[in-house]
Amino acid sequence: MASSTVETSDRVKLHARVFKPADLVPPASPPRASALAPPSPRSAAAARPPALAGRVDGVGRVPLRGHSADSMRLNAINMDIDGRLKEPTGTVYEDDKSHIEAVPSSENEGGELNKSNVPISTKGEKLEQSDKATVREDNGGSRSQNGPKEKIWEMEDQLIMAKAYLRFAPPGSNSHLVRELKLRIKESERVLGQASKDSDLSRSALQKMRAMGSTLSKAHRAYPDCPSMASKLRAMTYSTEEQLRAQQSEASYLMQVNARTLPKGLHCLSMQLTSEYFSLESKEMEFPNRDRVRQPHLYHYAIFSDNVLACAVVVSSTVSASKEPDKVVFHVVTDSLNFPAMKMWFLLNSPHPAAIQIESLENFQQWLPSNFSSAFRQSGVKDPRFTSPLNHLRFYLPEIFPYLSKILLLDHDVVVQRDLSELWKMDMKGKVIGVVETCREGESLNRLKSFLNFSDPTIQDSFNAKSCIWAFGMNIFDLNEWRRRGLTTSYHNWLQAGKRRQLWKVGSLPLGQMVFYNRTMALDRRWHVLGLGHDTNLERYEIERAAVIHYDGNMKPWLEISIPKYRGYWNKFVNYDNPFLQQCNIHK
């Protein structure tokens, strides 16, 4: 499935193009910039509105940067123009008269959040506070990441032209020009299959590019019908764009299916651990250090998860990063189905010197609402990631831990890289939850208007549409302040209001924005870096200086569709030599 996934970072506005005779003259040797040569990355970057994801780059080039060997590339030319390739309709523009409208950014009015700068502790020192938010530069696609690609793009254009000329030859023709075109096409495809940027091109590859230019000059002299060529290229563009849309739709669907499905290896692991658990004697089922579970002066972490291996990584990374691991206490809550496996794993792999407690969701039924398992389900939503009771258990933290005053909640798709004890020591100034905001100054993305239905009068009266969104995944809670403000009751009220009319998007995050509105304290972004489960453009230094990294998104690190360059941060906390992992064929 990964091979069919098409990157959409290079986005340009498609214009049908009027070809002039000069446009169809390929570069001579040495090559000059032809009319089909792509714009420079700088100008192209300025002309890529986000709304046109998946459009065709330039005249006939599909933006498959980074996937030069993709089997879908340029196959549209093999389709017959007559009857099978449909030329797109629309206005035809000259190149020098095409315009791309700039999309203005929404004015940033800030959020309603009270920011507090809290230093992040490392093993031996405190990091200095940054006065400015780290903003990742977008230099127009992959140029800054992978180097310039002008020659790669020129070769792709040559390949398109060569295949188009080949279609002009009479059926069954085996002339010298046809044989030469086929040879040049094969050579170019081989080069493009091995190179992703200009620096990958060898001297022989550049010689092949010049040879292709010479062959195209011959073809132009043999087939000088420019209008027919222009029509054929437009038809190729249209057909390839249709294929691209179909591939993107299929890739998106398959990725969603993959993200919802438990891998076979993890299912095997749960079964093996469950079987082992029920073979234990009752006295062997207890953890050491049980007396520390209720001591409020220790550093308490809550993890709600049904994924054994993911939970193991969170626990292992937290202990490894802690300066005082003997003061760390983990409270892991899972469902009844995964409770034996979860408990067996930590009985066999103790987080010593930290203490750990494993609880089943069913142990809290006496004070949870009778309809808890179905109360937050929305009509038409079947994704278990949005309907899992474990995701909504976070709104009952004061009831689950009545003996604690502070607790830190970690999602099971995070890795802890720095000591987090400073979070317990900070003054929360009457706020309930410490968060990292996901919006950027001057940007309109990740604002409350994207999550709530502001056409509803109740929402309009209660919230500011331009307030900044913050993230779950790593949050410190003042449970005493939560109890004093009665926020669990507020959660119930919003939940009931949402049953009568659509007030928010699916999931627990919009509810969190509502329940804790104006009750949040913004933390430095280095405490919690998000995007490792969906964003391939995160900077390495930004990841490695973070206290907690979060694989939010569909590409979780335990799935085959995970982003390879981020997988190592997670893998180093998994002991792949563990006999249970070996038995279930779980490898890097």
Image (cartoon, grey):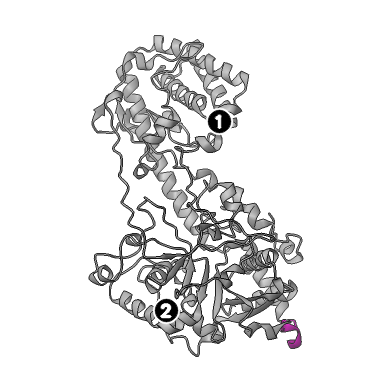
Q: Is residue 424 in view?
A: yes
Residue 280 magenta = yes
Q: Residue at x 32, y 47 (%)?
A: 105
Q: Residue at x 58, y 30 (%)?
A: 195
User: Could you tell me the amino acid type at mark 2?
Assistant: Ser
Q: Secondary structure at mark 1?
A: loop
Position of residue 362 measured from the top left corner of the image (x, y, whole percent): 54, 84
In-front residue for pair 47/177? 47
**Disc 2 vs disc 1: Cβ atoms closer than 8 Å?**
no
In the image, the segment drawn in magenta is: 279-287
Closer to the chain start, of discs 2 and 1, is 1
Q: Residue at x 45, y 80 (%)?
A: 482
Q: Is residue 550 in view?
A: no
User: Could you tell me the amino acid type at mark 1?
Assistant: Lys
Q: Which residue is mark 2?
A: 374
Q: Residue 260: which numbered mark, if any?
A: none
How many numbered markers are drawn?
Answer: 2
Residue 202 is drawn in which quadrant?
top right
In-front residue for pair 435/267? 435
Q: State the CA–CA distance, disc 2 to disc 1.
A: 52 Å
In-front residue for pair 308/537? 537
Neighbourhood count class around disc 2 (C-alpha, 10 Å): few under 14, some 14–19, many 20 upward: few
Does residue 262 appear to the left or right of 510 in the view shown? right
Quadrant for the C terminus, please: bottom right
Is residue 8 positioned above or below 481 on the image? above
Q: Secondary structure at mark 2?
A: helix
Q: Which residue is mark 1?
A: 197
Position of residue 490 measured from the top left corner of the image (x, y, whole percent): 37, 80
In-front residue for pair 506/77? 506
Does residue 388 appear to the left or right of 566 in the view shown? left
Position of residue 443 measured from the top left corner of the image (x, y, whole percent): 37, 51
